[in-house]
Image: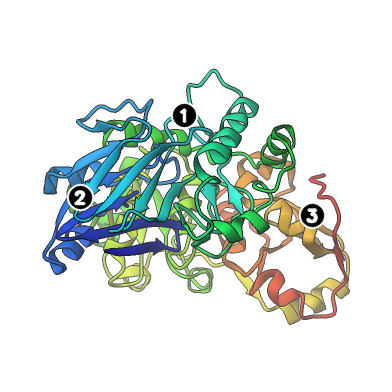
Amino acid sequence: MKVEQIYTGCLAEAAYYIESDGEVAIVDPLRETTPYIQRAAKDGAAIKYIFETHFHADFVSGHKELADKTGATIVYGPNAVCNFDFHSAVDGEVFKLGRVTIKALHTPGHTLESTTYLLSDEDGKPYCIFSGDTLFINDVGRPDLAIKSELTKEDLAGLLYESLHTKILPLPDSVIVYPAHGAGSSCGKNLSKDTYDTLGHQRTVNYALKAESKESFIQQVTEGLAAAPSYFPLNVLLNKHGADSLDEVLKSGVKGWTPEEFEGLANTLDALVLDVRAPQAFATGFIPGSVNIGLDGQFAPWIGTLNPDLKQPLILVCEQGREEEAVTRLARVGFDNTVGYLEGGIDAWKKSGKEVDTIKSITAEDFEKNYYSGEIEILDVRKVGEYESAHLVNGTLRPLDQINEWTDTIDKNKTYHIYCGGGYRSMIAASILRKRGFNHLIDIQGGYGAISKTGLPAVTGVTACNS
């Protein structure tokens, strides 16, 4: 028996590969199917099952295309309704894979169809669970994402409590918990950086599993939930209907255009020019009106959060050789309308004599000098929890994920110093503000991580205020 976790850090997502005696099961696959097919071929094995723990909201699954290419059976839990062929598992149903078994445990709460899969080894001993978004490491799935449900988040939290206490917690302490996500995912609020753990250890450290009562559990898991990214329901629908082939998306997306063609295409299609280079590379020269979301960060979740229109045409500015990566990662969250990229990158744009814009970016040391030189406007674009942990005196909380709500509340004539945690999100914010007509922006390199090493006054452990 082989069990491999395939973790994708930029999405904080875990898929799983299980092989026994020449038969393979894939749990919660990403949209690109080739890696799973190649992995099975390496083992001389055939993919028999594709198990989905629920309808994912934060990424587009590759279940349908993988089934089409391999003949594998897609398995969902009870209450699942799809527009393609699949097997609807009955609670407690056992699937044989080589010399091991996988048992479906219906665990509603995060969503109504949520199902945990229990893998038992060749001797019938429970080995691990693939818990999807039901049980995370140090957290549980948020109960407010089920779409078209008449149940409240409190109702779903109650179901989640029952699922955990009747289906999962009775299992042995030695059982390994393999969740669908880790830290950085919006599917929970307190996820650990660890990507697996034993059930026994989770009993002692997971706040939700230690709740003294069902009422206490419901209160704890429903409070402090940030607004769900607006693209989540759209991804759920894509997973229910089955997305187009990634191969077709790549054909149209990985196409190079000259600067003249690029400019014409962007204008004709009203396309968003998405610059996926590193923040500091972007700052030194970019196409006016383009938005920077760097590939070397949580790229796909941020484009989905900030621009939830999956039909929006996108045209890319990339580092050479990373075009296919960018198109693939956009497709992972349902952005299939990439129409190409700038051939030769920003250097080709500059050589053509076309206009280039810049954003001023300074070190934390230079920011410290500016801070003491007079009254300045400071925008902290981190999340509320980060701000509450520690922030600069005189800094104003303006979370990046709420930028569409607060842009109109600040003055375009003022100069703003912008910081985040490490310099990635601040450049995203600066690029969006520049596109919207803010011309006096200063990015702080390294974000609060660098600022905290200076002597600037900070406040810790306070409640955030957006005013």
Q: Residue at x 60, y 61 (%)?
A: 201
Identify which residue, 329 or 404, lies in the foreground. Answer: 329
- State the residue in front, 391 or 259: 391
> Quarter of the image holding residue 414?
bottom right
Residue 106 visible to an observer of this rendering: yes
Disc 2 secondary structure class: helix
* Residue 208 x %, y %: 66, 46
What label does residue 255 carry, if any?
none
Amino acid, disc 2: Ser
Compared to residue 416, the image places residue 246 above or below, namely above
Judge whether residue 430 can be spotted in this image. Answer: no
The image position of residue 296, as x and y in percent, is 45, 68
**Amino acid beneath label 1:** Leu
The residue located at (12%, 48%) in the rendering is: 69
Distance of label 3 from label 1 (alpha carbons): 39 Å
Q: Which residue is mark 2?
A: 252
Residue 449 vs 171, above or below: the answer is: below
* Mark 3 lies on residue: 396
Extreme-top residue of the structure: 150
Residue 2 image offset from top left, x and y in percent = 28, 65
Q: Pick whichever of labels 3 and 1 is earlier in the sequence.
A: 1
Q: What residue would you read off at disc 1?
A: 112
| Amino acid at circle 3 | Thr
Instruction: Determine the image quadrant of residue 44.
Output: bottom left
Q: Earlier in the sequence, mark 1 or mark 2?
A: 1
Kindly identify the residue that appears in the image at 42 percent across and 31 percent down.
113
Image quadrant for the C terminus?
Answer: top right
Estimate how packed mark 2 is, as few (under 14), some (14 to 19) or many (20 or more) residues with alpha carbons within 10 Å: some
Disc 2 from disc 3: Cα separation? 42 Å
